[in-house]
Image (cartoon, rainbow, N blue to C red):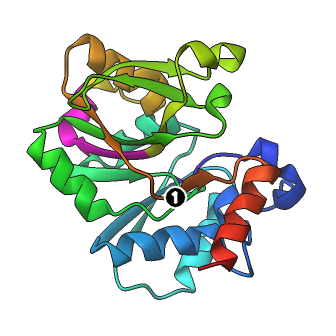
Amino acid sequence: MAGGKGTRLRDYTKDAIPKPLVQINDKPLLDYVINHVIKNDCKEIIICINHLGHKIQEYIAGKQYNASIFISKENEPLGTAGALHLISNLLHDEFFIIYADVYSTIDLKKMYLFHKKRKADVTIAIHNSSHPYDSTIVKTDTNGRILEMIEKPGDKWQQYGNLTQTSLYLVKKEILDFIPNNTKLDCEKDIFPKMLKKRKRIFGYFTEEYAKDIGTSERYYDVANKLKTR
């Protein structure tokens, strides 16, 4: 998912480049994300674009990756869930949803095995967050099944804890049944809560592996420092 505006990162985007192309140690974040999924044996990648998407198209056109890459362009912003209908004919029965502004070292193959073992409809990578106040907090049972999702609780986060989602999902294609056509919707805010109400099997894959978005200057520097130590 690479269609967001990155309004909190204007010091780096200058409203002239899309957030996934922000440079981290002389390389766009998008490169790190693509190389990570290829390293985890993903062979087909679909990039959903909107804001300044032509610049992502131009960048990808000038690169060579060991995977097939298809670009899906939204004429209007559709959110992380609404964008899925545009690519419904390209989706497999199960697929990962990955945000292009999140750097992660999460082992996708281990997450997939967890997903299959739990017979999950959706598996969400979860971790202990340093900023739960502006994240999506999750509550799980002892088996990892997600019972509740609390979106950006602000100062009330302490009553829920700091276990949050990482914006990395593995889903069955049936998720499309919960997403109306041509509607701007997000997975964590709109679709997953709806699926929980229908008692769909949504599990949290807990990991201590690194995952952080570059949504603020502080997090950008955290990711940059992490990459310097690799």
Q: Is residue 18 visible?
A: no
| 17 shown above or below 120 | below
Give the image location of residue 12, x and y in percent: 84, 60
Observer able to see residue 25:
yes
Task: Give whichever of 78, 150 is nearer the camera.
Answer: 150
Question: Which residue carries the number 1 mark?
Answer: 210
**Closer to the camera in the image, 79 or 126:** 126
Residue 230 rendering spot, x and y as whole percentages: 59, 80
Q: Could you classify mark 1 by the number of other residues whose Cα lies within 10 Å: few (under 14), some (14-19), or many (20 or more)?
A: few
Q: Identify the residue at image location x=71%, y=46%.
A: 5
The residue at 26%/33% (across/down) is 203
Residue 210 in picture, x, y percent from top left: 52, 58
**Magenta part of the protein: which range?**
168-177
Q: Secondary structure at mark 1?
A: loop
Name the residue located 84 percent from the left edge and 53 percent from the top edge: 15
The one nearer the camera, 124 or 182, is 124
Q: Residue 179 appears in which quarter of the rendering?
A: top left
